[in-house]
Amino acid sequence: MMRQILIFAALMFALPAMAGNANLSDVYRLALDNDAGYAAARESYKAGLEKQPQARAGLLPTLNLGANLRYNESRSSASPSSDYDSRSVFLTLTQPIYRKQNIEAYAQAKIQTLLAEQELNLAEQNLLLSVAQAYFAVLQAQDVLTTAQAQKQAFAEQLAQARKSFEVGASTITDTHEAQARYDLTAAQEIAGLNDLEVKRRALEKIIGGETPDLARLRDGVRLSLPEPSNMDAWVRQAEEAGIAVRLNQSAVELARREVERQRGGHHPTVDLAASYSDNRNPSSTLSSSSGGNIGVEFGWLLYQGGANDSRVREAVANQEKSRHELESARRQARLEARQGFLGVLSGDAQVKALEQALVSSEAQLKSTKLGLEVGVRTRVDVLNAQQQLFTTRRDLAAARYQTLVAGLQLKAAAGSLDAEDLKVIDALLQ
């Protein structure tokens, strides 16, 4: 009995999660758990975190323990022959005091850890954009298919009426041919729409790693918000300063600068604290056993290595210049994407408002055209044209809303401020 109660309770808690259509945040969570590209970026981030402890090891002591067991033969005309076993145990400790290359490598490792985090953030942002684009691409494909099916149904009705009117002599064969042509065209569009929807659903399935769920749609008459602040220059400045790709390239420049210093460190001397202890035993020999240790400071200076180190310095300097140019390119790209996103939202909002007005006009036109047909001042072709214009306007209005929402996300991505909370804002617009 208790088991049945627990199962019933579990089902009751699960029902709200299963009920209704998946919104944008739901699909994004599926993508976070299943997208292969993001999973690879996450593991790359974990690997990047190990750079710092690896480089830190170059500043910490090195302790080596060794031992050997040997059989020795000694043959000499000046002394008796001897065969004996020897055993040795030795322990060495080295603590770097000054190694320029190791110091710079540790500084590089800190930057590499930051780079790994920034690359993961960039992968997450790209995934978020990919999910939103794929989500609205499916909705738009559904709208196109729905429009084609609605047109097909309306034209089928017009075709049937045209045939009846022609049979009784109330209209010409031209009306029948026109309705037939419209019907055949929308039938072809329906087939293309079915194929396109299937492609868009498969693209989303690639990201979420499973079947595409039923998606929540935009509510009718939804109002879209404009960028805040409403100043394009402010967004451009934020993009070239805080964009993830820009910050990532800034870190790459610093990493390249440190690499130059690390390679130049090859010309520097090294200073280490070294200590060792050894214990040598000759149990089967008349030779004496010994043990002892020492501690001191070791100085080293590699004066010449065939020019290899100079070459590595030149290579690092060239890579540093390369990273600086890449940073400038990233800044320019960020400025471009910020402008494109901002203008995309503004133009999309204007297009939405214009299409909303056009939809009202198209509905009024269809109503008046049908009335004109009844009183004989309009033809069936006029009705077909009015119906097609209404369906097309509805489709274009939905597409404009989707594009405006995606442009808003792209604007925030360019500015480096896009996160999962932005999806929740869009979720509030879905039904």
Image (spheres, grey):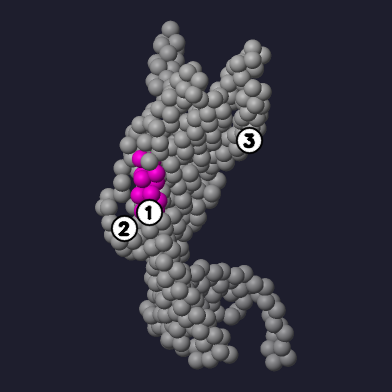
Q: Quadrant of residue 88?
A: bottom right
In three-dimensional space, the C-alpha distance between marks 1 and 2, rounded to whole angstroms, equals 8 Å
Region in magenta: 341-353
Is 24 colored magenta in this rendering?
Answer: no
Asked if one can make out residue 295 in the rendered structure from this viewpoint, the answer is no
**Does label 1 or label 2 sit earlier along the sequence?**
2
Residue type at tag 2: Met
Question: Looking at the image, is 220 positioned above or below residue 64?
Answer: above
Which of the numbered marks, if any, corresponds to residue 232?
A: 2
Count of all numbered marks drawn on residues in the image: 3
- Which residue is rendered at x = 62% and y = 25% of the image? 175
What residue is disc 3 on? 192
Query: Pointer 1 and pointer 3: residues touching (CB < 8 Å)?
Result: no
Question: Looking at the image, is 333 positioned above or below residue 317?
Answer: above
**Does label 1 or label 3 sit earlier along the sequence?**
3
Query: Pointer 2 and pointer 3: residues touching (CB < 8 Å)?
Result: no
- Which residue is rendered at x = 40% and y = 66% of the image? 331
